Amino acid sequence: MIVNKRIGLTILLRESLGILLLLGAWDFVVVFLYQVFHQEWMEIPSLPLSLIGSALALFMSVRNNSAYARWWEGRTLWGAVTNNSRSFGRQVVSILGGRHDLVRAMAAYPHALRMALGEVDASADVNRLLSPEMAEQIRGWANQPNGILVQLGVGVTEEATRLGIDGALHGQIDRILSDLANAQGGLERIRKTPLPIQYSILPRTLANIFCIVLPLSAVQTLGWVTPLGSSLVGLLFVVLDKAGDDLQEPFRNSPHALPMAAMARTIETDLLQSIGEQPGPPVKIENGIQP
């Protein structure tokens, strides 16, 4: 996730530069053919294109709102993972006598979760935190984060039985694991259910067609200045489409994705410090991007 506004603006400009040059080249071809060779077939009335542009802008706004809703829901669910992980660590320390293997397994859980959601390899963090016994028990699981939750539930039940803990307290801890499972299910739903094709491909297709036709309508009014005006307007629509595309996949390995590595390391730090252990080094912000 981009956390430095100045560097973020540079990234956005760099990502848009190629599109701007392409639009400018096409606009120059159009104005050259119209002004030099007087290609009158290029004279397209501006009113229909203005109406199409307004409708396209409205459509892309609806799509971008849907994309941002996915991004924000992903961040909200990661917040639930953070809060419930901290609550689990506190309950283990205060009720179960501080079983370090359970706390460390919970610290490994967000790393396994981000590995399951995104295109990253966090196996080193998971193996570093899990006990050899639990790592062996979840080996081969198709859904390793869920495997960790299952083993945590088994470990909590064993410890509660050994200590003779009241069923209400045991149920309180188990409820935290259920809330974690619910949050994970929500994250997996976002990961496995992309936006409908009408929201993902159609806006880009329409924006490209609009950018191709736009200079044909503007050249009779702007003349040689067409590449300046038409390119900037076309760039606006293309950037709007790209913004929606960046936000609709919040777990994609890109500068615009959620900072899952940083959130997982924050959870790990909070949990390990509660049992007096040293967490891994903090995730560094590189080039204004927090991974």
Image (spheres, rainbow, N blue to C red):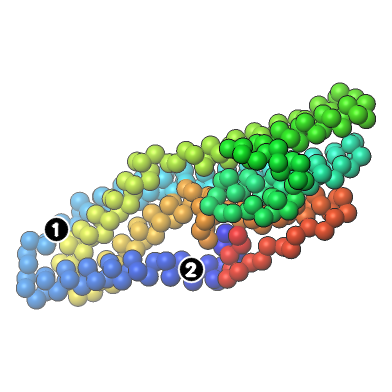
Q: Amino acid at mark 2?
A: Ile
- Mark 1 vs mark 2, foreground winner is 2
| Residue positioned 80% across, 49% down in the render | 271
Q: Is residue 51 left or right of residue 79?
A: left
Q: Residue at x 67, y 55 (%)?
A: 124
Mark 1 Cα-neighbour bin, 10 Å: few <14, some 14–19, many ≥20? some
**Disc 1 from disc 2: Cα separation:** 36 Å
Which residue is labeled 1 in the image? 44
Q: Is residue 66 left or right of residue 169?
A: left
Q: Where's residue 286, x and y in %?
A: 60, 69
**Residue 185: quarter of image:** top right
Lower position in the chain sequence, tag 1 or tag 2: 2
Secondary element type, mark 2 = helix
Disc assigned to residue 190: none
Instruction: Tell me the quadrant of the picture where the C terminus can be found.
Output: bottom right
Label 1 sits on what residue type? Ile
Q: Residue at x 35, y 69 (%)?
A: 18
Q: How many discs mark residues in the rendered view?
A: 2
Mark 1 vs 2: CB contact within 8 A: no
User: What residue is pinned by disc 2?
Assistant: 11
Using the rendered view, name the quadrant where residue 17 is placed.
bottom left
Residue 107 is left or right of residue 194, and the answer is: right
**Residue that appears at 86% across and 23% down:** 167
**Residue 211's x, y, as percent?**
26, 59
Location of residue 145 with respect to 118 vertically, above or below? above
Camera sees residue 212: yes
Which quarter of the rendering shows the N terminus?
bottom right
Please state which of residues 195 and 52 is positioned toward the viewer in this rendering: 195
